[in-house]
Image (cartoon, rainbow, N blue to C red):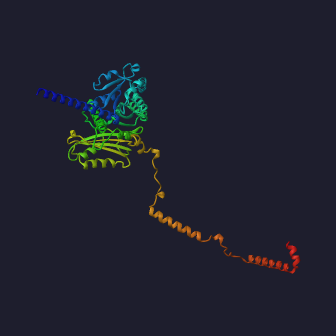
């Protein structure tokens, strides 16, 4: 019995070792297949300057699977950034660890000084999301250099920029506008958020820290929806190849928004919130390309998907639209819709210039005589004119007709004498011999 037990244990041990070995080989094979066929998309969010770093620091805790970098010339400000975010100081030789003092030239030179160091941030990165508050020195000066380096390395770029408050003055607004113009050639898409729009989502009594936090939370929800769209598989799947198709281009104005709603009319409420972002001064009108994803639990209805899809496509039926549908039981009764629209037309300032004509270009009021008549009357008139013209062409002109003229007595006498003289001369010809008449004619 003892020998039999030993044999059984030995057999079990052999089989277990074989089973473990086969499991290991299967795992290694699966990893090899995955590494060969599926490319793991790498997205990196980089906050540039004091404002950009603050936004990134607050957004990072809500989003996973993405690297967050806080890049600043001000080392003191970087020390206040949370531990979950990688800090990236640059330009210390130029700024001595201080800020750029609202001078974009200093920010630009600081970034150029650390060009090789900045290039390391974009290594093996598929999409770089650059976040900055324009109007200062570091963000306005360094952000275009970060974008340029990313483009030269073939990395796709999405810029999200906040614009200064009106009370910050004309100088900051000019710096921000000039920086944005420098950024556009190096970005695939960009989105602008005027700080002035904060007042649309806060109360008058809201403290300043909570005010900025409200904007940052909305940004984090938008980015979270975009990242979930790319990373999480769905029934109708969206991957980075789809995102690359949407991002393909240069300097396109984009609209990113994500909404969550629940209840019986959650689809209607979600689409209403989705298309009416209070942070942007524009919407998806005129968008060339649209990417959107619907996420809900297993109770997601086909009617809800159809309503959301139809409403988005009605904005521009010529737009290239890619959509996805994901099911996640963690959402329970909630429904999330995330939308990215690219090429949303012109910027608000440019649209305002075109819509408001200058005083010299106002159309002058036409005199009453130049008022156009209805089309029907025009046709009748043209027909009448043609018929009259045809009638005139058929009737001969008066100059072509030899009408009899009225003559007095003296004219008649002269005419009679002339006729008589002609007859006399004709008779004389007949009296001359024929051969002489020929010589005379010759």
Judge by depth and name the residue closer to the eye, 17 or 161: 17
In the visual, does 44 lie left or right of 420?
left
The x, y position of residue 103, in whole percent, is 41, 25
Between 390 and 223, the residue placed more toward the observer is 223
| Rendering quarter of residue 231 | top left
| Nearest to the observer: residue 340 or residue 172 | 340
User: Going by the image, does 255 lie left or right of 417?
Assistant: left
Q: Which quadrant does the C terminus fall into? A: bottom right
336 to 4, vertically: above or below: below
The residue furthest left is 1
Residue 46 screen position, x and y as percent: 34, 29
Image quarter in which the N terminus is found: top left
Q: Image quarter for residue 396? A: bottom right
Q: Which residue is pictured at 32% across the width and 47% down the height?
A: 312
Residue at 25% x, 46% y: name it.
267
Q: Nearer the viewer, residue 290 or 77?
A: 290
- Let me know if residue 63 appears in the view: no
Look at 47% across and 45% down and name the residue there: 360
Point out residue 142 in the picture as x, y percentages from the top left corner.
Answer: 40, 27
Q: How many marks?
A: 0
**Relative to 63, is 260 above or below?**
below
Q: Is residue 332 visible?
A: yes
Question: Which quadrant of the figure has residue 271?
Answer: top left
Q: Position of residue 57 (x, y in %)?
A: 29, 28
């Amino acid at each position: 019995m003892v020998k039999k037990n030993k044999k059984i244990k030995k057999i079990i041990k052999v089989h277990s070792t074989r089973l473990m070995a086969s499991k290991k080989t299967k795992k290694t094979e699966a990893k090899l297949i995955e590494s060969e066929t599926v490319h793991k998309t790498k997205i990196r969010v980089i906050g540039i300057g004091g404002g950009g770093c603050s936004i990134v620091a607050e957004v990072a805790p809500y989003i996973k699977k993405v690297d967050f970098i806080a890049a600043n010339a001000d080392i003191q400000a970087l020390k206040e950034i949370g531990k979950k975010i990688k800090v990236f100081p640059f330009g210390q030789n130029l700024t001595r660890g201080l800020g750029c003092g609202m001078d974009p030239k200093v920010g630009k030179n600081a970034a150029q000084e650390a060009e090789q160091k900045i290039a390391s941030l974009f290594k093996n990165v598929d999409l770089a999301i650059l976040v900055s508050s324009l109007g200062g020195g570091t963000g306005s000066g360094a952000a275009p250099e970060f974008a340029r380096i990313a483009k030269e390395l073939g990395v796709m770029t999405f810029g999200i920029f906040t614009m200064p408050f009106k009370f910050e003055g004309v100088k900051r607004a000019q710096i921000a506008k000039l920086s944005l113009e420098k950024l556009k050639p190096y970005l695939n898409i960009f989105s602008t958020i005027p700080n002035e729009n904060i007042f649309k989502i806060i109360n008058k009594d809201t403290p300043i820290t909570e005010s900025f936090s409200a904007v940052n939370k909305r940004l984090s929800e938008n980015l979270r929806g975009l990242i979930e769209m790319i990373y999480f598989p769905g029934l109708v799947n969206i991957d980075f190849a789809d995102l690359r198709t949407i991002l393909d281009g240069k300097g396109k104005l984009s609209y990113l928004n994500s909404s969550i709603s629940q209840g019986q009319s959650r689809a209607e409420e979600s689409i209403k919130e989705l298309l009416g972002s209070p942070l942007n001064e524009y919407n998806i009108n005129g968008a060339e390309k649209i990417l959107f994803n619907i996420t809900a639990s297993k109770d997601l209805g086909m009617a809800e998907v159809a309503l959301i899809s139809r409403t988005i496509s009605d904005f521009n039926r010529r737009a290239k639209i890619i959509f996805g549908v994901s099911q996640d039981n963690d959402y329970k009764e909630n429904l999330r819709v995330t939308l990215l629209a690219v090429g949303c037309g012109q910027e608000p300032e440019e649209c305002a210039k075109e819509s408001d004509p200058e005083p010299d270009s106002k159309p002058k009021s036409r005199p009453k005589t130049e008022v156009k008549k209805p089309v029907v009357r025009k046709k009748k008139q043209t027909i009448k004119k043609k018929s009259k013209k045809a009638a005139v062409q058929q009737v001969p002109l008066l100059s072509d007709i030899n009408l009899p003229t009225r003559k007095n007595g003296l004219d008649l006498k002269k005419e009679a004498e002339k006729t008589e003289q002609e007859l006399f001369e004709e008779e004389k010809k007949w009296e001359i011999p024929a051969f002489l008449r020929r010589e005379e004619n010759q």
